[in-house]
Image: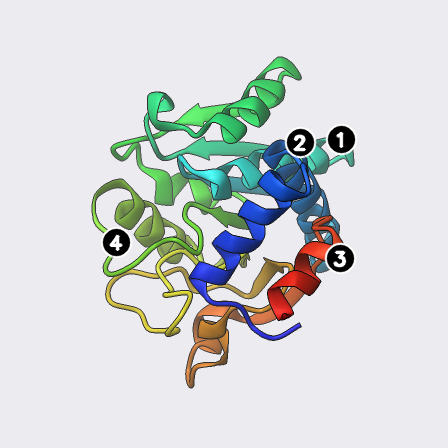
Amino acid sequence: MDSLSRDEVREIDRRAIEVAGVPGAVLMENAGRCAADEIEQFMAGRAARRVAVVAGAGNNGGDGHVIARHLNMRGAETVTFLVAPAGRISADARINLDILRKLGADVREVAGGGGLAEHLRRFDLIVDAVGGTGIRGALRGEPAAAVEAINAAAQSTPVVAVDIPTGLDCDTGHVDGPAVTAAMTVTFVARKKGFDAPGASAWTGEVRVVDIGVPAETLAAMSD
């Protein structure tokens, strides 16, 4: 499939949910599980398996909660750092956060700071699930602080980005402020147009595309 723009990503999600009847929580579960598969491959051969998931308020953060759950079930030691106030977390992300907490996973709220960079340096891998394809322009506030903390820790700890490195523009591949520098990006359905821009690979690292269960009819309709 051709690389997708921000609007095309939104339209695929809308059609999958509203036309095909696939609940958003199901798409999120598929996305997180498939991303966890790729992360396990990335970690293959590493003796330690301590993973920090840095999660924002939106669906990208929800993908992160699913990733944390699946990695926990596979024997990894995970800590999920919430970098947005609990009241702002999206509905589908809330479902998966609640599951994660009920299973006794380690979830820590660090909105507004909390020495995140120092925490992240103690892990073997960082998962960037702060923000997704909807971000435009320079990051500010909590997302910017989270990205700066991730990048500070990335000097010694590899980062895997979920769908898109936070701060990289989906359509242009440009960076107007802080943006996550990832060793690998696990992206959903197809590459994003911004990934093909000159120099974008400095932020994406290796790009792996995974299927999240969007019906074939939905994808075919987008090509008509």
In front of the other: label 4 or label 2?
Answer: 4
Q: Earlier in the sequence, mark 4 or mark 3?
A: 4
Residue at 37% over, 22% down: 86
Q: Earlier in the sequence, mark 1 or mark 3?
A: 1
- Kind of element beneath mark 4: loop
Distance (Cα) linking label 1 and label 3: 30 Å
Tell me the kind of residue under disc 1. Met
Residue at 36% over, 45% down: 117
- Kind of element beneath mark 1: helix
Furthest residue in direction bottom, as rendered: 198
Label 4: which residue?
139
Q: Earlier in the sequence, mark 4 or mark 2?
A: 2
Residue 155 visible (yes or no): no
Label 1: which residue?
73
Tell me the kind of residue under disc 4. Leu
Q: Tell me if mark 2 has few (under 14), some (14-19) or many (20+) residues whose alpha carbon lies within 10 angstroms of its own.
A: many
- Marks 1 and 2: CB-CB under 8 Å? yes
Label 3: which residue?
216
